[in-house]
Amino acid sequence: MRCPYCQNENTRVVDTTGDARGGVRRRRECEECRQRFSTYERTLLTTPLIVKKDGMREDFNREKLLHGIRIACAKRPVPAAAIDQLVHDIETSLQKTGRAEVSSRVVGDMVINGLKELDQIAYIRYAIVYLNLDDLHALRNEIDHLLSEKE
């Protein structure tokens, strides 16, 4: 590991801790300048390609998913950490499938289910686009369905 201060390649690990997401945080010290710094390591697993409705394939884009969920949760009392955790859970689930390709519908269903647990208004906002709720009756039916599940 190269020191970010002096670029020396001789550093030693002072402390190592794990986190709930499976990553490893290492506290390091440069043997040349004695500066300390932290590194964070996480396992890189391949994420399957996403197959869109029109048959096109694209790489899984974590930032795109995060952006869409943040829009649905805008001005709602949903902590940023909860949104990040939802995106992390979806990405991890996709990686664990071990498949080379996954339908965009699978990802959308994961988002819908996650938002239903996080915030019902954010769920409805996302569902309007995702489920193509294009009139008030369809929206009302979805809200009624959500309310009946809650009871």
Image: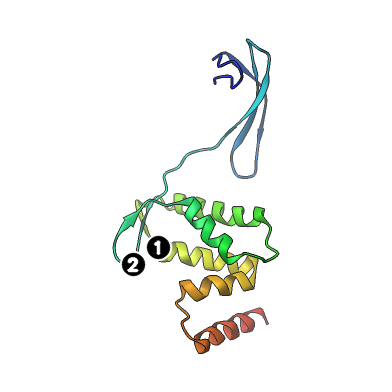
Give the numbered dot on residue 104: 1
Q: What secondary structure is found at the residue carrying circle 2?
A: loop
Answer left or right for 93 relative to 103. right
13 over 41 or under it: above or below? above
Amino acid beneath label 1: Ser
**Which residue sits furthest top?**
32
**Which residue sits furthest bottom?**
137
Identify the residue at horizontal 63%, vertical 73% (top origin). 121
**Which residue sits furthest left?**
55
Amino acid beneath label 2: Lys
Identify the residue at horizontal 40%, vertical 62% (top origin). 104
Q: Position of residue 129 (x, y in %)?
A: 48, 73
Please tell me in which quadrant of the rendered image residue 7 appears.
top right
**Circle 1 residues within 10 Å: few <14, some 14–19, many ≥20:** some
Q: Position of residue 141 (x, y in %)?
A: 54, 87
* Quarter in which the C terminus is drawn: bottom right
Colouring used for the render: rainbow
Tell which circle, 2 or 1, labels the residue nearer the N-terminal end: 2
Q: Position of residue 23 (x, y in %)?
A: 59, 38
Whole-Å distance between the Cαs marked 2 and 1?
Answer: 7 Å
